[in-house]
Image: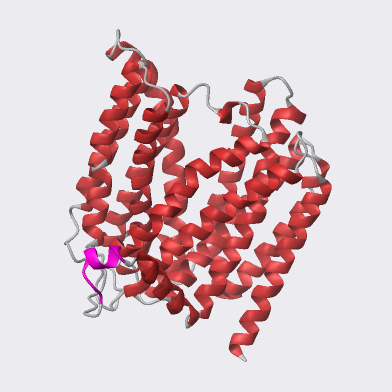
Amino acid sequence: MSLAAPGRHPGDRAPRTGFGQLLHLLGGAGFRRLFTVRVTSQWADGVFQVALASYVVLSPERAPSAWGIAMALAVVLLPFSVLGPFVGVFLDRWSRRQVLVRANLVRVPLLLVLAGCFAAGLDGPGLFVVVLACLSVNRFLLAGLSAALPHVVEADELVWANAVTPTAGTGAFVLGASAGAAVRPVGEVVLAGIDGAGDVFAVLVAACGYLIAAGVAARFDRSALGPDFDPARPAVRAAVRHVVAGLVDGLRHLRGRRDAAYALATIGAHRFCYGLTTVGLILLYREWFHPGDTDAALAGLATTVVVAGAGFVTAAIVTPVVTPQLGRHGWILLLLGVAAVVQVFPSALYTEPAVLVAAYLLGVVSQGVKICVDTLVQSGVDDAYRGRVFVLYDVIFNAAFVAAAAVAAVVLPADGRSVPVLVACAVGYLVTAGLFAVRRVGRRA
């Protein structure tokens, strides 16, 4: 399998460090096109979800308890994990270019239906089914983007590619959310007389974003993004009947690819600890920093999210520069150690400035670990299994967070303050780092 990026000249080697590497990466036509698909579709996601949040004004998330947060996360994330195994089967058999095109296109009629639901004032299970369908399609898109990435960059550029694309996608989502808030007043004028006109208009704008992303993806050749041909693979229909067997094959493949397997276990443990502190953070703002003032609590949370996003951006810039010196494994170990310290100090001070500092540092840790794990998984498994392995990655990523929310509902007090829980998270990070280091050494021995 060739990992050469379309649009590069033979022998054209990228600089190893610094922004020259980033500029070189963006100079590749294949990478640039895949990058555009991601940021455009995630921008549309941001517009769509602002409209959704605005319409569902009585959702439990507006006044969350620990159990309410856990249930909301389960509703949002677990159905995607159930769908995920089927996604992997298709990604390892169907043209990934076609998956990217259709995953964007299919959301257009779904959003038109949702716009009709908003205009009709629909609520309850019917609305939930439409929303779930809209969100579920995203599993195909994000998993497909990750599985396709090694086909548009060189093998030694994956760290940079994994740093740029998810972080830029998150930034595009935030910009989309801002755009969604901005277009709602326009919709009230353009669609005057329609109930929920602003939300309906924002949904229509999001549909336009998905159409653009589909058009960009269609510019790839059908076979440009894989999967690589494997004559031993059964037809799609037969594979769907044996989804569990397919995932077992993926697990067996990981058994011989220890680097990728240990990386997945590490991200799962990290997500569990991160999930505990996230639920605690929401409760902290609502019940401790701003009790009884929902607007102030939401504003404080929004500021924290922005600060954590700055940490993601920092990780995207620093990780590709640091990993040539420390290695991916060394950088993961250092980040886990930083997370352990942050859980005790400054998090345990339980002041708003301390929380912002902790949010920034944990943002660096979260994105830095994910970039390295993405790269270890992409480079550590065969392309014929890459879709299924990334689906397993997705299941672990989501299920660990939901499990953490369920545990948080039991162990956290109503105001979210618990030094013992913070200490337990710190120990969890240290144990994860220790096991990752020991297994790495044992593999080399």
Quadrant of image for the C terminus: bottom right
Residue 229 in the image: above or below residue 425: below
User: Which residue is painted at 37% across and 77% down in the image?
Assistant: 382
Res 434 → quadrant? bottom right
Decide whether residue 401 is among the magenta residues: no
User: Residue 46: where, in percent of width, then height?
Assistant: 41, 36
Quadrant of image for the N terminus: bottom left
Query: Residue lying furthest bottom in this view?
Result: 445
Residue 77 in the image: above or below residue 231: above
> Could you tell me if residue 6 is visible in this image?
no
Res 84 → quadrant? bottom left
Left or right, 120 with reference to 369: left
Left or right, 333 with reference to 351: left
User: Which residue is painted at 43% across and 49% down in the image?
Assistant: 80
Q: How is the image coloured?
A: secondary structure
> Could you tell me if residue 37 is visible in this image?
yes
Left or right, 203 with reference to 252: left
User: Residue 293: where, in percent of width, then height?
Assistant: 69, 20
User: Which residue is painted at 65% across and 30% down in the image?
Assistant: 300
Res 176 → quadrant? top left
Residue sitting nearer the eye, 55 or 34: 55
Query: Residue lying furthest front in this view?
Result: 241
State how many labels appear.
0
User: Residue 252: where, in percent of width, then height?
Assistant: 45, 78
What are the residue bounds of the magenta stretch?
Answer: 233-241
User: Which residue is painted at 35% across and 21% down in the image?
Assistant: 118
